[in-house]
Amino acid sequence: MLAIKNAKIFTVTNGVIEKGVVLIDGGKIKSVGAKVSVPKGAEVIDAAGKWVTPALIDCHAHPSMYEEPHAPKSPGDLNEITDPITPQLRVLDAFNPQHPAFGHMRRAGFSAGCSLPGSANLIGGQGICYKNHKAAIVDDMVIAGSEQMKMALGENPRRCYSELKRMPSTRMGNGAVLREALFKAKIYSDKLLEAEKDPSVKVERDFKLDALVPVVRGEMHCRIHCHRTDDIVTAIRISEEFGLDYVLEHATEAIPIADYLAAKHAICVVGPITMGPVKQEVWQITPETCRVLDEAGVTVCITRDGSSDVRFLPHDIGYIIARHGLKWETALKALTINAAKAMHLDGRMGSIEPGKDADIAIWSGDPFCNYTLCEATVIDGVVYRD
């Protein structure tokens, strides 16, 4: 059993507890409060003068997928630019627990994340959610049943395939090719359901369509890359046509449609928040986006959209708190409970509550201040001080 005592505890969902105790047993939070008794024999961390929060989550990242460190002439493992529809691809097959990014993130207070394929393809493949344990194999990090289907609209797919002189080469093509894939998957799914009821119905199995069956049945979360306003609206339109369970990734031009997104109860994973106008579809990028969306009532997450550089995300957020009016409480939710919601894992992580995974960060001060150090990251009750 582990007890963290005398801490200033930011529970996220139940306020702030001064000089509180978090009691951990079997990798889960057993109790939290100002009057929790510490059992005899428990391992104790005295966090007097420290801030304790849920450990951080970057719900849109690419650890071990980017070519990092860079190898000349290597394309990396992020994008399979050979077919715009590749739902059968799995990050699981390219996820390397030995990658240095995981240690960097652990030292910065990150306990979990979602690693996704890139955005070259309209359907890029299945990402995974993971715990940031030290591990030898991916099976010891991946969260079972947490697959997320990566999709993308906008410049990246049309640029990649126009260069190959094939469809899609326009935004119209993006929409058409994505709809066609989902349409075929829906027919295939219905046929499988029919065959379950009637053994005389024969279905020729299709590897790619099999991967899309849980998507069109609303059983697999879809993470849709969309920067421009028109791409954001197209993502929602197609999702509603096919009954997809979706989250909007980047949402760079979301400010003009903030009320629309709130009415749709959208979750927006915004970022990278300090990126410059490096390509046409992010010319309108602004650090104001998180604040405006939050004020409109949109659920906001924040991402670095990177690999080992995820460790700098708290510093980025400190900048937009100081200069662009983002509420501190919103910032903490964006990297904890909201990020967990984006991954459909808020029932087990993202806040300090009894019964949830014991994923906790201990800070020397405000986690969004660049003078602050993460002194320990607790993941499923295991303390990392590296």
Image (spheres, rainbow, N blue to C red):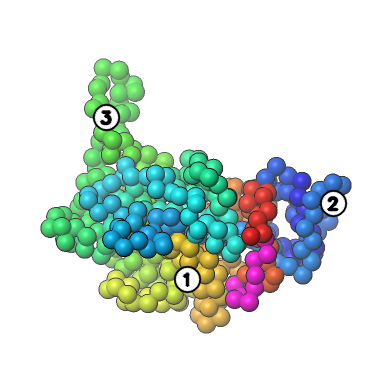
The label on residue 290 is 1
In this rendering, which labeled residue sits more in front, label 2 or label 1? 2
At x 43%, y 49%, the residue is 95
Q: Nearer the viewer, residue 246 or 60?
A: 60
Q: Position of residue 233 (x, y in %)?
A: 31, 61
Q: Secondary structure at mark 1?
A: helix
Q: Which residue is mark 2?
A: 37
What residue is at 40 percent from the left and 74 percent from the top?
Answer: 275
Residue for badge 3: 205
Q: Residue furthest right?
A: 40
Q: Is residue 84 left or right of residue 273?
A: left
SS at badge 3: loop
Provide the residue span drawn in magenta. 368-376
- Would you place residue 320 above or below residue 102 in this image? below
Locate residue 376, reporting x and y percent.
67, 60
| Residue 270 seen from this side | no
Residue at figure coordinates x 68%, y 49% from the top left? 381
Tell me which label, 1 or 3, sits earlier in the chain: 3
> Tag 2 or tag 3, which sits nearer the N-term?
2
Q: Which SS class for mark 2?
A: loop
- Is residue 198 shown to the viewer in this render? yes
The image quadrant of residue 231 is bottom left
Is 295 on the left-hand or right-hand side of 275? right
